[in-house]
Image (cartoon, helix red, strand yellow):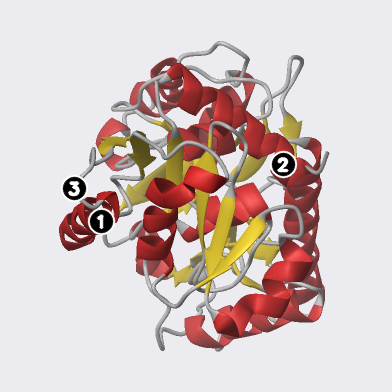
Amino acid sequence: MSRASQRREVLRATAAERGLDAVLVTNLLNVRYLTGFTGSNGALLLRVDGRDLFGTDGRYTTQAGVQVPDVELLVDRATVPALAREAVRRGSAGPPARRIGYESHDLTVDGLHGLERVLADAAAGGTVPELASVRRAVEAQRAIKDPDEIGSLRRACAVADQALAELAAEGALRPGRTELEVGRELDARMLALGAEAPSFETIVAAGANSAIPHHRPDQTELRSGDFLKLDFGATVEGYHSDMTRTLVLGQAADWQREVYAVVAESQAAGRAALAVGADVVAVDAAARDVIVAAGHGEHFTHGLGHGVGLEIHEAPGIGQQGAGTLAAGMAVTVEPGVYLPGHGGVRIEDTLIVTDDAPELLTLTSKELLVL
């Protein structure tokens, strides 16, 4: 049984527990997770009786045959309505679905109304199937990574590690260059090392800009004595890495070393708190308390971390407003920061896997304060 088919069986069990006959999966990343399909138009009708249908349009017939060989194919440009009609009309291949789950976070209001009309028409005066939201059932599955996914994450993190190491060794992080130049070169290096794409818009923030948590790189020149904050990642096999390192160009001032030491201590406390069963709010507190004790509580303005996988931000969220506990196999970031407006800021971030023992660190670039 393939990984994708194993994942479908988990969702099938969830659907049965909720009293559903079928689930209509429309979120493309969830479709990829459950089938392996990477095209731009695809949906899955997963039936509790196992008679699944994968839908796409004529552009992807060949691709679907290769990537989704174990699910019956339905080719129709109007993919979702076509699958919905088949859910009602499957009399010859099995009983029609009476209760269909759908992804309410993905389907628009207009899309839902359209789906209701399609089901009513397909029922042709008979019993119209009930629609019931499955909310984020597939995302809940995706929060626990299997060995293949963890392997992809390791490779994505390795690409990012190597790209930064090569730029630093070649002297590319130096005064006089602009944030944009550094960001574009870092992106290009990750692509040359095998990334499909950067995980997100690379953040390069120099000097006072480093105090802006999600600064977009611009023509600001790197200067001696500045903090340089680099937040970036590589996408490999669809999976994202996420890492932040902050360094100093030239000689580091005492205040820079002090702030860096606080963030480093906080980040270490956050990593140490990653354990099976740990409450995500408590994990955030373990790191945040260090920063608060140092007098910088108001300068840590975001959550401690988030899940990472097929999306750069996915479940679980680790923060003061988070909910739930950690489980083995979750891939998460730990990224505390201290941001001093007008002066500069520090963030240190790793991607890790929660395990039954100590968390596995995937981003291996040193977290010692690097002065170039």
Q: Which residue is mark 1?
A: 115
Tell me where residue 226 appears, x and y as whole percent: 49, 67
Type of amino acid under label 2: Ser
Lower position in the chain sequence, tag 2 or tag 1: 2
- Rounded to the nearest angstrom, the CA distance separating label 3 from label 2 is 35 Å
Q: Which residue is mark 2?
A: 5
- Rounded to the nearest angstrom, the CA distance separating label 1 from label 3 is 16 Å
Type of amino acid under label 1: Leu
Image height of 210 relative to 60, above or below: above
Residue 295 visible somewhere in the drawing: yes
Looking at the image, is mark 1 or mark 3 nearer the viewer? 3
Image height of 42 relative to 25, above or below: below
Mark 3, Cα crowd under 10 Å, few <14 / some 14-19 / many 20+, is few
Q: Are marks 3 and 2 in contact (CB under 8 Å)?
A: no
> What quarter of the picture does the C terminus occupy?
bottom right
Q: Dot 1: what SS?
A: helix
Q: Which residue is mark 3?
A: 125
Lower position in the chain sequence, tag 1 or tag 3: 1
Looking at this view, is 227 or 35 the one in front?
A: 35
Mark 1, Cα crowd under 10 Å, few <14 / some 14-19 / many 20+, is many
Q: Quadrant of residue 326?
A: top right
Tell me where residue 189 appears, x and y as whole percent: 74, 79
Lateral position of residue 258 relative to residue 19, left or right: right
Q: Residue at x 44, y 78 (%)?
A: 77
Lateral position of residue 299 relative to residue 80, left or right: left
